């Protein structure tokens, strides 16, 4: 079950909704796309799912048919009202609607109240996709798998590897916690309003353990410092943090840039800092 293009248009007219660019609002109007997301999410009937940016409820309706429970988080007042109308009388334990900004929500508490194992399935608001995914990986270990639709450019940043043009701090953080891949591309025509860019569905599966074991805070403080000046060589961007001896000891070329280092190389540099007791 999902909303058709006509039903979406009627809801937008009825409530005089003008999608907010500031909230990254693009509503899916093709039931086939919703069915594709559900299929790719590969949900079990016993699964608990969190959906962020539920919008008009198209995906929410399909999720309710596919899993045990859905927690839908939506920040827009009017959309929360519509979501309640569209989903109708749901069993209390089947659907929980939270009217909040997910970036300020105590997500750990929200999740723990219902289950210790979650999936994230969402058509993510474009403006928060990257920081939200990184935040969830860092602070919400109860979410083991994420199947999200985002702008193609954002998707490329999420899955980028060393040497890729899109490789950056988010790419490193996602790789640290999980394995990510693009599993489908979505045309602009399935949305209202129609975005100017292609979208992609990305699946992110959390690792049982992070890919490396060094001190997380020191590791990402180091990586963040390097990417803050990503066009500079490491000997310049990390001046005052790492010495020539550190680069020599790790056999890492100090003329490289942040985008050229693997997580394993960042681990070696972090070990140099830890060994000196700088915590």
Image (spheres, rainbow, N blue to C red):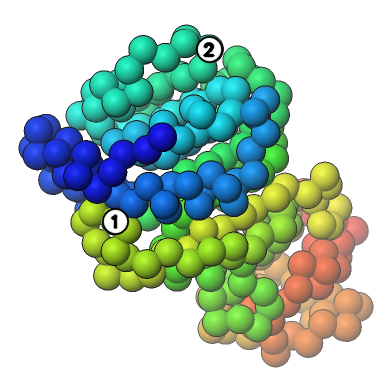
Mark 1, Cα crowd under 10 Å, few <14 / some 14-19 / many 20+, is some
Rendering coords of residue 95 (x, y %): 47, 19
In this rendering, position of residue 140 left or right of residue 267: left
Mark 2, Cα crowd under 10 Å, few <14 / some 14-19 / many 20+, is few
| Numbered circle sitting on residue 13 | none
Pointer 2: what residue?
A: 93
In this rendering, position of residue 162 left or right of residue 77: right
Nearer to me, 228 or 70: 70
In this rendering, position of residue 39 left or right of residue 64: right
Residue at image point 56% right, 32% down: 66
Q: Quarter of the image holding residue 114? A: top right
Nearer to me, 3 or 201: 3
* 142 to 273, vertically: above or below: above
| Numbered circle sitting on residue 191 | 1
Give the CA separation, mark 1 to mark 2: 30 Å
Which quadrant would the N terminus be assigned to in this image? Answer: top left
Rendering coords of residue 27 (x, y %): 29, 48
Rendering coords of residue 56 (x, y %): 29, 36
């Amino acid at each position: 079950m999902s909303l058709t293009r006509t039903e979406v248009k009627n809801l937008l007219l009825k409530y005089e909704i003008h999608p907010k660019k500031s909230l990254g609002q693009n509503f899916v109007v093709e039931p086939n796309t919703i069915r594709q997301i559900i299929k790719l999410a590969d949900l079990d009937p016993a699964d608990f799912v969190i959906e962020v940016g539920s919008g008009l409820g198209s995906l929410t309706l399909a999720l309710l048919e596919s899993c045990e429970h859905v927690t839908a988080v939506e920040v827009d007042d009017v959309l929360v009202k519509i979501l309640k109308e569209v989903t109708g009388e749901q069993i209390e334990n089947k659907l929980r609607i939270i009217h909040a900004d997910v970036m300020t929500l105590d997500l750990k508490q929200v999740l723990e109240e219902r289950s210790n194992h979650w999936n994230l399935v969402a058509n993510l608001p474009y403006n928060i996709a990257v920081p939200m995914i990184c935040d969830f990986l860092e602070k919400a270990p109860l979410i083991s798998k994420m199947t999200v639709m985002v702008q193609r450019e954002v998707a490329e940043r999420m899955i980028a590897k060393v040497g890729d043009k899109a490789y950056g701090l988010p790419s490193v953080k996602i790789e640290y916690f999980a394995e990510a891949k693009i599993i489908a591309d979505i045309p602009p025509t399935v949305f209202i309003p129609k975005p100017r860019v292609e979208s992609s569905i990305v699946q992110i599966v959390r690792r049982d353990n992070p890919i490396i074991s060094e001190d997380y805070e020191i590791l990402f403080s180091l990586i963040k410092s390097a990417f803050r000046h990503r066009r500079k060589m490491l000997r310049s961007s990390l001046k005052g943090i790492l010495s020539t001896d550190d680069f020599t000891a790790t056999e890492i070329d100090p003329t490289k840039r942040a985008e050229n280092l693997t997580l394993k190389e960042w681990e070696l540099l972090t070990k140099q800092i830890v060994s000196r007791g700088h915590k």
